[in-house]
Image (tube, rainbow, N blue to C red):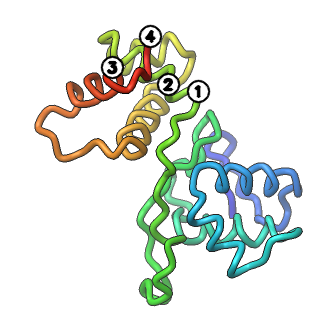
Amino acid sequence: MLEDLCSGTVNRFDELPRSFFIDKDKKIEQEYPEQHAELCNIIGTTGCEYGRVYQFFACNSSTKDGQPDIDDDGNFILEKVSCPIRHACKRSTCRAQVSGKLSARELQVVSLFVKGYPEEEIAHRLFISKSTVHNHTTNIYSKLGLSGSTNPDRLLVAHAIKNRLVN
């Protein structure tokens, strides 16, 4: 099931167009290459986009929790979900980790963040919601492996400058 939080409609996966699965499968391949390779081994390669996307979301997204699983920019918002087999599968699909490559939108967020803008102003400048900015920021920290610091904002700014993520 895929819930549209704006309209309140819920669509069954098998009722969504094939283009949806092809698009999301490509995104999984780009951002979660280890998990995509594993899904290809388990489910198959040619013409198996539906199965791979279905399994990826089953392992990483909750159902009808009122929270988006895909943000306004098409980024996945992964969650820890209850596994019916209690993670006995030991597959990496259930523990998806992003590849570390920032999207163009995430780079825009980093650039404005480094300039000192708060989330509200970044949202205003990029014409997105504050919660979407927050989701991008969370994804940025995850992709860059930045955590555990007493001052994560300073850590992100230093990392962005050192690695030339911003001009």
For disc 4, the marked residue is 167
Up-down relation of residue 11 to residue 81 (above or below) = above
Residue contact between numbered discs 4 and 3, judged by CB atoms under 8 Å: no
- Vertical comparison of 42 with 31: above or below: below
141 sits left or right of 22 in the view: left
Residue tagged 1: 104
**In what element is the residue under mark 1?**
helix
Q: Residues within 10 Å of mark 4 (few under 14, many from 20)?
A: few
Question: What residue appears at the point 45 percent right and 70 percent down from the top-left corner?
Answer: 81
| Residue annotated with mark 2 | 107
Residue at 68 percent across and 81 percent down: it is 42
Question: Marks 3 and 1: which is nearer the front?
Answer: 3
Q: Looking at the image, is mark 2 or mark 4 nearer the viewer?
A: 4
Q: Residues within 10 Å of mark 1 (few under 14, many from 20)?
A: few
Q: Position of residue 165 (x, y in %)?
A: 44, 23
- Secondary structure, mark 3, is helix
Q: Quadrant of residue 154?
A: top left
Q: Which residue is mark 3?
A: 161
Q: Secondary structure at mark 2?
A: helix
Disc 2 residue type (three-letter):
Leu
- Cα–Cα gap, marks 4 and 3: 8 Å
Mark 3: which amino acid? Ile
How far across and how far down the image is residue 103, in percent? 57, 33
Name the residue type under label 4: Asn
